Amino acid sequence: MVPFIIDSVAGALALVLLGAAPWFAAPAADASLFVGAEACRACHPVQFEGQSKSAHARSLFPASGHPLAGRVTSSRAVLLDGFRYDFQLRGSRLAFRVRAGSQVRELPVDWAFGAGDQAITFVSRLDEDHYVELRASYYSALKGIALTPGHQSYRPRDLPAALGVRYKTFSPRSEILSCFGCHSTGMPALGGELEIRPAETGVRCEACHGPGGRHVSLMAKGDIEAARRAIGNPARLKAPALTRLCGECHRPPAAGDVAIDWSDPWNVRHQPVYLSESACFRRSSGALRCTTCHDPHGPLRRGDPAHYNRRCVSCHTAAAHPPAKACRAEAGCASCHMPGVRPQPGLTFHNHWIGVYRAGEPLRPQR
């Protein structure tokens, strides 16, 4: 969870609280219309089971309930700017500890953002007005904890500040609400102490299809056609619209007056921004879309280059492209044409600006 990733929702607090993309905003106004993924399971068991294994579905947990919580607490302490950080288990509760000499500050950890396929970032509630994004995150590739993404320029001067970056619960930019909005489904609620309570953890069915209450009700009445019209289906969207939908959390393609710093490796993680620059996307007449390569109801096909190669050769035939031997296709088309970028140790993002890259220059393809 990197604060600067999400800027498209600034000033759109209502949409964040609705937990829905703009094209679903109107029916989402009533929180009761969200029914949860289990209600979808009865009629769509295959899609439910597949999507439950995805990183989307596992993008938010109560901290102590994260499947990798044991790895987090067993990680060695890390020293950052003179402060020593580690995670401890206090009974059944995960705790974050910061030490500076003989001084110690410990804070219960409330939320874990991220499936852990790459990293997990932790958030705690300080009081009714503030949340804090903790300064140490867990990285699966490192098998340990290190500085949280986005905190490189943050230099704490005392122990309270060393906990991490603070956010007001109801700031004008709605940073922390945006984080919950993109990592959960439905309309978050506020508890008695003004704590944020996600309606459904993780990015589940209604995050993309919109609230399903009317759909379920009409199906129960046997009104199939009306039920179909009552639920959103991203498959009906044209490629640019689908890219914008995914961009609601992954950042939408840049508007004409927005400048993108293509030299910043952190920006590579904004897949819709980069995909929309690709000739493959621009010239495919809508044939190339996010779901061409990524099954929305399943996990990423990591370690399976043949799966993605088949998508590439559906357009790039041998007559129009060098043969497999010249391309080293056994390593995967993406290994050359969508190179991995490491903005910091422990994180790798594939550049979705599909193109021809010079060796050692993975940020921007040759024109």
Image (cartoon, grey):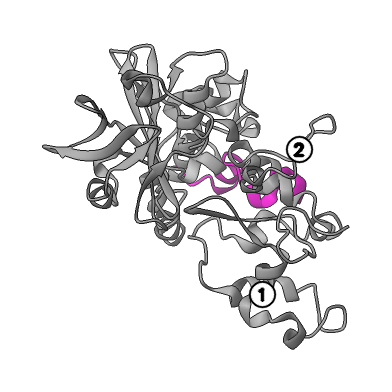
Inspect the magenta stretch and tell me whether residue 235 lies in it.
yes
Q: Residue 10, percent across and down?
A: 62, 22
Q: Could you say which disc has been placed on residue 260 in the image?
A: 2
What residue span does the magenta drawing correspond to? 221-243
Disc 2 residue crowd, few under 14, some 14–19, many 20+, Cα 10 Å: few
On the question of residue 363 being in view, the answer is yes
**What residue sits 77% from the left and 61% below the top?**
287
**What residue sits 55% from the left and 48% below the top?**
224
Disc 1 residue crowd, few under 14, some 14–19, many 20+, Cα 10 Å: some
Residue 105, placed above or below residue 53 = above
Among the 4 quarters of the image, the one containing residue 249: top right
Callout 2: SS: loop
Q: Mark 1 points at which residue?
A: 309
In the foreground, 126 or 222 = 126
> Mark 1 belongs to which amino acid?
Asn
In the foreground, 363 or 79 = 79
Q: Does residue 136 appear left or right of residue 296 in this picture? A: left
Q: How far apart are marks 2 and 1 (CA)?
A: 29 Å
Among the 4 quarters of the image, the one containing residue 328: bottom right
